[in-house]
Image (tube, helix red, strand yellow):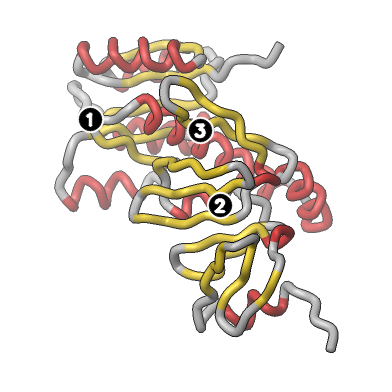
Amino acid sequence: MKKKIRVLIVEDEFITLDALRDELEDIGYEISGDAMRADEALEILERGDTDIAILDIHLKGSESGIWLAARIRDKYKIPFIFLSAFSDQHTIAKAAETNPSSYLVKPFTSADLYTSIELALLTHAKNVEALHLPESHTKVTNELLIRDSIFVKDDLTYKKILIRDILYIEAFRNYLELYLPQGSHVIRSTLKEFLAVLPTEYFMQTHRSFVVNMEKVDEVGANFLQIGTAKIPISRNQKEEVLSRLKFYF
């Protein structure tokens, strides 16, 4: 049986904390602990049974969520997600210095929560592999990733999607539409975040708003790639790199 992901919640508003706990458990995560102050969170982290943390930027007490994030990054080395309502530019800039895996802005949906956690875990795992594996192992890692799957919100359930089945991806601000042979699904994520967890041997950005599974390309035009009936644009800046990935015979 697959081990459940264990999440630490650090939130100083009881109603939000309680709602987060319920939503996480409903999705299928396990709660490693919850805290309303940074010092309480550190006690839970010391047990070593937390896989990811969700931190409110603004915490009551002497230490902020940003301070706690820096400790997690330097000592516990697990991914963390910031949770906050709208914050001023200075606060966001300070938070960014801790290299969070993602941000959740209140109010958020269960789909937002699930997507943020899964992308944070995947990005963190890929970064750890990049730090510890020799360059010769990169190809093996990417080949394993192409066999992986993700779960996306589909009405009241989450539907499994195989990475290798994704034909191409189109970005709309902070949302992505994943195109598959049997239809499409919309998820909340930036293109940059999602591209970071995709196997680079297969997926490539062709345009600021498009990523293509190069294994699925049927035809190549002067400024587009065709997959089935869909024509995906190639930007001028990406054209040389995109074409270098394809084999042409005359």
Indicate the secondary structure of the residue bearing disc 1.
loop
Amino acid type shown at disc 3: Val
Distance from disc 3 to disc 1, alpha carbons, whole Å, reads 19 Å
What is the number of the mark on residue 160? none
Question: Is residue 46 at all visible to an observer of this figure?
Answer: no
Q: Which is nearer the N-term, disc 2 or disc 1?
A: 1
Q: Which is nearer the N-term, disc 3 or disc 1?
A: 1
Structural crowding at the residue carrying mark 2, measured as other residues with C-alpha within 10 Å and reported as few (<14), some (14–19) or many (≥20): some
Could you say where residue 152 lies in the image, as x and y percent from the top left?
50, 33
Q: Residue sitting at 64 percent across and 74 percent down?
A: 242
The answer to which quarter of the image holds residue 187 is top left
- Is the residue under label 1 in contact with that under label 3 (CB below 8 Å)? no
Describe residue 129's horizontal placement relative to residue 11 as left or right: right
Amino acid type shown at disc 1: Pro
Point out the image quarter for the N terminus.
Answer: top right
Which residue in the rendered view is the most extreme toward the front? Answer: 229
Distance from disc 2 to disc 3, alpha carbons, whole Å, reads 17 Å
The residue that mark 2 highlights is 196
Amino acid type shown at disc 2: Ala
Could you say where residue 150 lies in the image, as x and y percent from the top left?
59, 34
The residue that mark 3 highlights is 152
Question: Is residue 96 at all visible to an observer of this figure?
Answer: yes
Q: Residue sitting at 63 percent across and 80 percent down?
A: 221
